[in-house]
Amino acid sequence: MDLKLFIDNLPQNFNSFDLRRVFSNHGQLADAYVPHIQRRRVQGRFGFIEVTSREHGDRVISEVDGKLVGHQRVRVQWARYPKRSRRSRRSMTTRIALNNREQSTTWRATTQAKVSHLSKDFVKQSRVDKQSRVAKVFKVDKAIENLEWLAKSLTCISDVPRDVEALRIEIQGAFPEKIVVRDLGKYKFLLTVDSQEVKEKLKTEGLKQWFSSVSDWSENDICQTRRIWLELVGFPIHIWSEQNIKQIAGHWGDVLYV
């Protein structure tokens, strides 16, 4: 099943990385791609994203189609490809690849992950980051104790960035029920309540003044960012400095506070 969405009228400076960043607010993406070759007589750029399911794609269309991205109102729909013979498709791909050696025009996939084509500057910076940071992959089990309260949680998406502390005060002041507000990024939040009845009530009333999308939490939801504390043990006092601490902690992300 083809699960690609066509995104039209993107800002002129948009690349594949920008497209993934914007649409990851609406669920996990398999891929995101803005072709290097664009239409000459049309102002907005176009791109493609690949979603994880048909339901996910329909939800993205309902949430994003017609919304402003930058200063332009984007159009989102299921990608449709003209019917051509297999030979003509192959020759078309070959011609585009010859005209555009800097970027591939095909969707590439591995058995574990799908990779987006990024701008030259981003790829160059990524190579620098790889040399200075150690990347590790961990296989972990589900935290079973979390599943109970996650089942009573809502994933809420805002059209504008929000401060989680201010949002928490506003929401807890507007409802008599106990509501725990967690941030999953600047635009994405997780609201947890005490019962399924309260959760269903919040889905239909009261939250639209803050969020454009309210849905049940699912295992496909991912955090855009997450803050953690690192405890450094056995750190010699003669190398104790903010610069050295940031260099060590930088293997896990951007250091906000020492």
Image (cartoon, grey):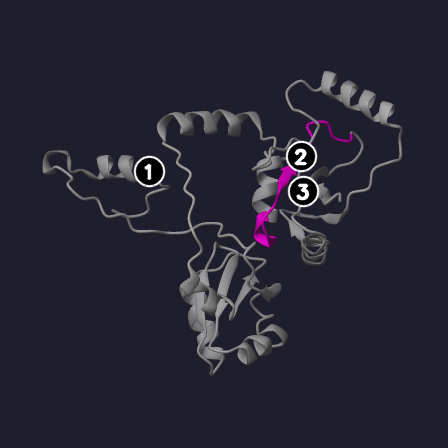
Q: Residue 216: where, in percent of width, then height?
A: 58, 66
Q: Earlier in the sequence, mark 2 or mark 1?
A: 2
- 197 relative position to 87: left or right: left
* Secondary element type, mark 3: strand
Q: Which residue is mark 2?
A: 34
Q: From the viewer's perspective, is 146 left or right of 102?
A: left
Residue beneath the point at 49% across and 79% down? 174
User: Which residue: 61% across, 36% down?
Assistant: 16
Mark pair 3, 2: CA separation: 9 Å
Magenta-colored span:
24-39
Per the image, the residue denoted by label 3 is 49
Mark 3 or 2 closer to N-term? 2
The picture quadrant where one finds residue 245 is top left
Task: Using a 10 Å C-alpha cutoff, classify the residue at mark 2 as few (fewer than 14 neighbours), some (14 to 19) or many (20 or more).
Answer: many
- Checking the image for residue 250, the label placed there is 1
Vertical placement of residue 75 versus 174, above or below: above
Q: Position of residue 73 (x, y in %)?
A: 71, 50
Residue 116 forms part of the magenta stretch:
no
Q: Is residue 161 left or right of residue 60?
A: left
Residue furthest bottom as drawn = 176
- Amino acid type, mark 1: Gly
